[in-house]
Amino acid sequence: MSRGLKGACLGATAHWLMDLMCGKTDTFELVTALRAIHYQAYYENIAPPSKGIRSVYRAVQHFLMPYGCTTTFETAVPAMDAALYMPGNTGALLGFANSKSSHSVALMRTSSGRRFLYCINVGVHEWVCSPANSVRDLMREYNELSRQEFRTVTEGIICTTRNTLPINGIA
């Protein structure tokens, strides 16, 4: 399912991931367009979009802390890859870029090991991959799925929790 929203990806992606990681939802539904635009405006009040994912890191960290989540900001792909193998549930808010644009997507790895890609423009897809796959592989597969040409994984907010989440009941 595609919504085709431009400019609301960070707001939608951050809240999709936070809703899962705090246990607010037990589904992989897309964030509604109205809600995505509302949160995007909120984040743009914190910092300009040119600051990328870094601009929302503290807000995400502050929101998830009471729910037993550890949250880190990473710019090194190996650190992002390593986080995907931590015990429990892991969520990653990732930034992709090329010379002309950038985009935010989320990757959720449930405690069962299943991985789900979220993008406001292309929907939610299970990412069936080998254990050796990295976020760069995810970006390449995302490019094929979305017909984009992002070349770099720029940054990521990694959230982990050993808590059982409602989503673990279906994934």
Image: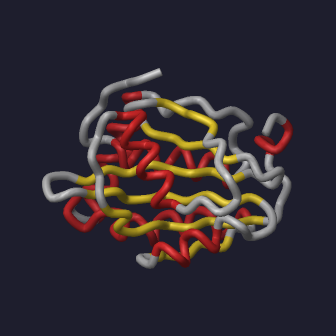
Percent coordinates x, y for residue 31 in the rendering: 49, 33
What's the colour scheme?
A: secondary structure
Percent coordinates x, y for residue 106 in the rendering: 51, 50
Q: Image quadrant for the C terminus? A: top right
Q: Which residue is painted at 30% across and 31% down in the image?
A: 5
| 139 displayed left or right of 48 | right
- Given the current orientation, which residue lies at the most extreme left position? 100
Question: How many marks overall?
Answer: 0
Q: Which residue is painted at 59% across and 29% down in the image?
A: 29
- Given the current orientation, which residue lies at the most extreme top position? 1
Percent coordinates x, y for residue 89 in the rendering: 74, 58
Which residue occupies the foreground of this view, 75 or 70? 75
| 131 displayed left or right of 138 | right
Q: Hey, which quadrant is residue 134 in on the image?
A: bottom right
- Residue 107 vs 5, above or below: the answer is below
Which residue occupies the foreground of this view, 32 or 103? 103
| 141 displayed left or right of 69 | left
Q: Which residue is painted at 29% across and 40% down in the image?
A: 148
Which residue occupies the foreground of this view, 129 or 100? 129
| 151 displayed left or right of 95 | left
- Residue 156 vs 98, above or below: the answer is below
- Residue 161 vs 27, above or below: the answer is below
- Residue 110 vs 133, above or below: the answer is above
Percent coordinates x, y for residue 104 in the rendering: 38, 51
Q: Hey, which quadrant is residue 86 in on the image?
A: bottom right
Q: Which residue is painted at 73% across and 48% down in the image?
A: 23
